[in-house]
Image (cartoon, coloured by chain):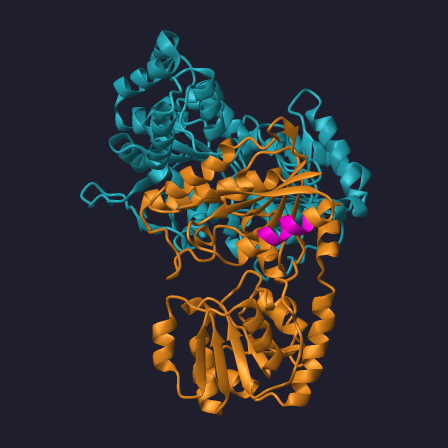
Chain colours: A orange, B cyan
Amino acid sequence: MRIAVCRPQVPFAWGGAEIFTDELAARLRMRGHDADVVSVPFKWYPGERVLTQAFLWRLLDLSEADGRHIDLVVSTKFPSYCIRHPNKVVWLLHQFRQAYELDGTDLGQFSESPADRVTRRKVQRLDRLALGEARKVFATSRNVADRLERSTGIAAEVLPHPPQDLEYRCDEYGSFVFSVGRLDRAKRIDLLLEAASRGGVDVVVAGDGPDRGRLESLANGRVRFTGRVSPEELADLYARCRAVFYAPVDEDFGMVPYEAFLAEKPVITTTDAGGPLDVVRDRETGRVVEPTVEAVSAALAIAPEEAQLWGRAGKTLAERVTWDRAIDTLLA
Amino acid sequence: MKAAYYSPLPPSRSGVADYSALLLPELSTRVEIEVARPGRFRRRPSADVLLYHVGNDPDAHGWIAKELERRPGVVALHEFVLHHLVAGLTLARGDARGYLDAMERGHGLAGRLLAYGVIDNRIPPLWESRPEAFPLAGDVLRSATGLVVHSSFVEDRAREAGFAGPVWRIPHPAWPLPGIAPAGLGDGPIVGCFGHLNESKRIPQLLAAFERVRASDPAARLLLVGALSSRMRRLVLPDGVHREDYVDEARLWSLMAACDVVVSLRSPTMGETSGTAIRALSLGKPLVVSDVGWFAELPGEVATKVPVDEREVETLVTVLQSLLADPDRRAEMGAAARQLVAREHSLDRVADLYASALEQAAGGIAVSEAVVREVATAAADVGIAPGGPEAKELAGRLEEAGLGG
């Protein structure tokens, strides 16, 4: 089949969605399909710009390319699913969250002005139209599927995807707790730092982001910030840590738990983390605790034996999420 | 965003007052609301959008219609026929000329002549004899920048009358169920009829049908709850009829909960919804309704519809006998009614729809214009000519995506 994998692209930004779509196209090609990634730059501000930029997708003609029919489009996140195609499948990473659960919060973008209010409504209407047209809608996590159903009434099948390809292994259950990801406030690394400081636990933080300066100022001598790391370094840190901390606020999906599990490491998360709760289960594959310093501090004190037990249980779970399975479901 | 809210409110006994008392607290969690109050010297609310609840009762809605005339806004049109309202605002205040002009605006010279007939007592008041033929909704529609309606029936009438603005169809909200036990009314099946009991509720037809139902099932009772109109007071009530006058909300729920079937007949219809029918659906009661207006739009699985024709009484007898004899069917209809209320009439959903409508009314045009301007500019830059096939395609796509002007 000729398959177009659609994603919006924020120029100069590269993250989970880009890794996922590239990997999906590559895996489709490995199975003999003619797959390509179609991306359009996306800028969602100011004002009604979010609508005109979404409308760009509505004008694209992916019925064929260079005289050859395109059999399927797989769209991933707003506004790429606004594309019109008779065989559109959506594998939803997330909607435009500012128009939904982030509205009215610090992370929202729409003010109380009539124009902003109606722009938000128009995004929601566009979602109902574009997602309603899809032959099938999958969501990467239960959290994403639930949000979709709450906001549009559209039911999605939960279909997680495997994490990035690394040389996953487990060398030891070392003395440090590991955290990896973009350093912004929503990832709540400060909660980890405070809890670790209270419990006297060593921490390694990989990744970069706008919150790094503030986080470094909060850290004591037992925290090491590595900045961005290579795939080899990342695999090594997973292999040597005791456990992985991953507790963003209401995360869509989160690949980190799957990566940790493939390295046989348990994951410490919080009850409000969203997507990670699909696979992190308290005292089965890690710890799920209240998002307080006290609770996280207690959860960080994982004995090596517990870490091994829960990490291995996590690995069994993560190994079930394969590209073969995901693609079979996607194309069924 | 802020909305000014014009509506009768309790202690007014109008259905719209009850409606707003239910809706306002929930809507206020979504949109900043300033409730407007009647009174010549009151400050008019300043807001991004004005919402006027308009019904046919001049006492409850007269001041609202006057405010609408001064400052156009979104109209929640609770019924399409507004003849009684217009007559109340004109003739009842000694303004015969106002009534004549309104009738001429609505129905041309023939309307003006008929209005003369009414004023001179040559013909019966049209608001009593044939209001549905002379709805007089035109003035309200001309001042409305958008319409909220509860039914396709009212939407269609408004369109037929030439209203071209946006219309939002928003179901009547359901009241939360009070934890009240059914009234103890003894054994035997009970048919209930609630509300202001006037001619349009088809009370004579209902009584005639009930008499025949009772002949075949002497244990059957008919519960008639609500104030009887003067003409209805002359009716002789057959055996088995249990009467209660105006009752408070708690008693109303309790009596309705005791019913096996609730009847809500109507003809002629002014395009109104029925709070009684909504309450009955919430309680999971099978409904029997007239096959007219909003009532005809209820799904068949929750309501049996009786055509208003020469066989109306016959049909009513058959329908009531069959429902009273079939507890399984009643249970099925009741379950479907509860599902319908949860799906369509939940207060949460209705408040969301109102907030959405008000937001679109306040900002929709500005946003649509901005989007269309940007797309049109880009189209012009690449040489797409206005009116050409490409421009038409762009316009179609914008419309489809809800982004059109």
Give the quarter of the image for residue B233.
Answer: top right
Looking at the image, the residue that sits furthest to the left is B41
Residue drawn at the location 72% of the way across and 76% of the way down: A313
Of residues B179 and A217, which is closer to you in this image? A217
Give the quarter of the image for residue B372.
Answer: top left
Residue drawn at the location 38% of the way across and 76% of the way down: A215
A24 falls in the magenta region: yes
Of residues B183 and B163, which is closer to you in this image? B163
Tell me: residue B337, above or below residue B382: below
Of residues A90 and B17, which is closer to you in this image? A90
Residue B240 position in % (x across, y down): 70, 44
Give the quarter of the image for residue B40.
Answer: top left
Q: Quadrant of the C terminus of chain B?
A: top left
Residue B17 position in % (x across, y down): 41, 46
Looking at the image, the residue that sits furthest to the bottom is A200
Residue B15 at least partly seen? no
A210 falls in the magenta region: no
Overall secondary structure of the magenta stretch?
helix
Please give left or right for residue A327 compared with residue A274 in the image. Answer: right
Of residues A194 and B100, which is closer to you in this image? A194
Please give left or right for residue A233 compared with residue B136 in the image. Answer: right
Residue B381 position in % (x across, y down): 34, 25
Read off the magenta span: A21-28
Please give left or right for residue A101 compared with residue A303 in the image. Answer: left
Residue B287 at least partly seen? yes
Residue B14 position in % (x across, y down): 43, 42
Please give left or right for residue A111 compared with residue B262 in the image. Answer: left
Number of numbered labels in the structure image: 0
